[in-house]
Image (tube, rainbow, N blue to C red):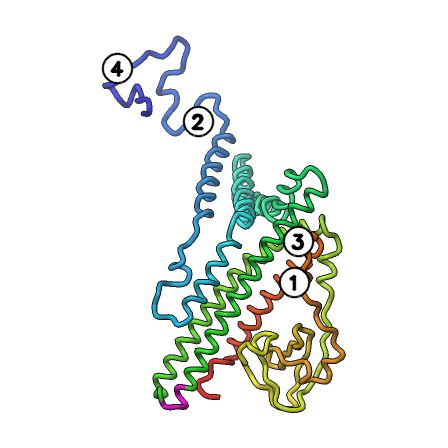
Amino acid sequence: MPRPHPIADTQAGPVRANPVGANPVEANPVGANPVGANPVRGKLHRGLAMLTAATMLTACVSTREARIGGEDGDACRTQLVALDSTGNFFAEDILRGAAMGAVGGALIGGLLAAATGQRGSGIAAGAAIGAVGGGVVGGTAGYLSARQQQATDQASLNLAVAGDLAAENAQLDRTQIAFDQLMDCRFRSAEQIRADLRSGRLARPQAAAAMENIRARTQRDIQLAQTINGQIASRGAQFDTAIDTVAPGVKQAAAMPVRAVPAQPRGDVKLYLRPDAASPAVAQLPPRERVTLRPARNGFTQVETSSGLRGYAATQSFPEARSLEARPAVAEGGDVRSLAASNIARRDNFAESVGTAERVMAQGQGFELAT
């Protein structure tokens, strides 16, 4: 129980007299700094309280219903929940450290500027400098710094980072599969609507409404995937800092430019959403259309049209693709260098998948009412 104030609560007992030589109560008006108090320290104490509150707010995680809505008869709900669930992993502590590093840096930087008598632009500058410094320490360097403090030598550091990369890679695989399955479900639902329209099971107004519903849901799915991809990229920046230390040269090798060649199909060529013949077809190229080819994997080539649409076609569809060096398969080894290389490749593959789906949506492909 808090101790009652001797002046505010007259029932607590008689008011104790001030010692001889002490300042009378009236000498320190309410709200003024106590005699001998440090105004800078007081402002910093308040700033720390604000930082604590910000930390608590940052730690809050939205509910599934807030992110993807409740059950509403969505035929692809199972796949949507699976993708959303994988995003929980990437929103964990490694990201929170980066966010709070920047928030804390901004608060303390601004408070120090204010406490030293600066106003306006001086406070803003202090906050900006603090945010940058705090973001670097709490963000990209935070993970490596923590692991270095825990490690006893380089070998134990390599082992710890390798274990973290293995866990990250496993989750990236689950996220990639979840996104692929969700997109498959959406595009196949659109194809079913077209089939029902052709067969007469749906009248055109009903089919148009159903197709618009699928299109809107797919757009929200891609926005969710973009959010997860942003979280993956933020964690990836922290891993990249560590990779430069434990596996030098791996990141630079992964960043080598990809060769592209112009081409024109000799006949109709089907474009797929992924380098996989089992994935949904998103467009069909007519003969002689000018396109740009880039290497992919699994016997496929990435194709980009002049309008910006991207998809994948069998490499054999383009004689020009023979001059392209196929993208190497993701290395699967337990050593830290292999894990680092495969982590970068997995991140790139997921980002490419999301980008391809986004371009397809922007071009209106896959969700036409009639083909």
Give the number of the disc on residue 33.
2
Give the secondary structure at mark 1: helix
Task: Tell me which residue sits at (66%, 39%) in the image.
Answer: 151
The residue that appears at 74% across and 61% down in the rendered structure is: 253
Give the amino acid type for the residue marked by disc 1 in the picture.
Ala
Mark 3, mark 2: which one is toward the viewer? 3
**Label 3 SS:** helix
Q: Which mark is residue 345?
A: 1
Examine the structure image and report whether residue 104 is included in the region drawn in magenta: no
What kind of secondary structure does the magenta stretch mostly adopt? Answer: helix
The mark lying in front, picked from 1 and 4, is 1
As helix, strand or loop, the secondary structure at mark 2 comes to loop
In the image, 250: left or right of 14? Answer: right
Q: Earlier in the sequence, mark 3 or mark 2?
A: 2
Q: Earlier in the sequence, mark 3 or mark 4?
A: 4
Q: Residues within 10 Å of mark 1 (few under 14, many from 20)?
A: some
- Which callout, 2 or 4, points at the residue further toward the start of the chain? 4
Label 3 neighbourhood size at 10 Å, few (<14), some (14-19), many (20+)? many
Q: Which residue is mark 3?
A: 240
Mark closer to the chain start, 1 or 3: 3
Image quarter of residue 11? top left
Name the amino acid type tagged 2. Answer: Asn
User: Furthest residue to the left?
Assistant: 11
Where residue 357 sits, quadrant-wise, is: bottom right
Q: Circle 4 is placed at which residue position? A: 13
Choose between 353 and 3: the one closer to the eye.
353
Kindly indicate whether the residue at mark 4 contacts the one at mark 1 (C-beta within 8 angstroms): no
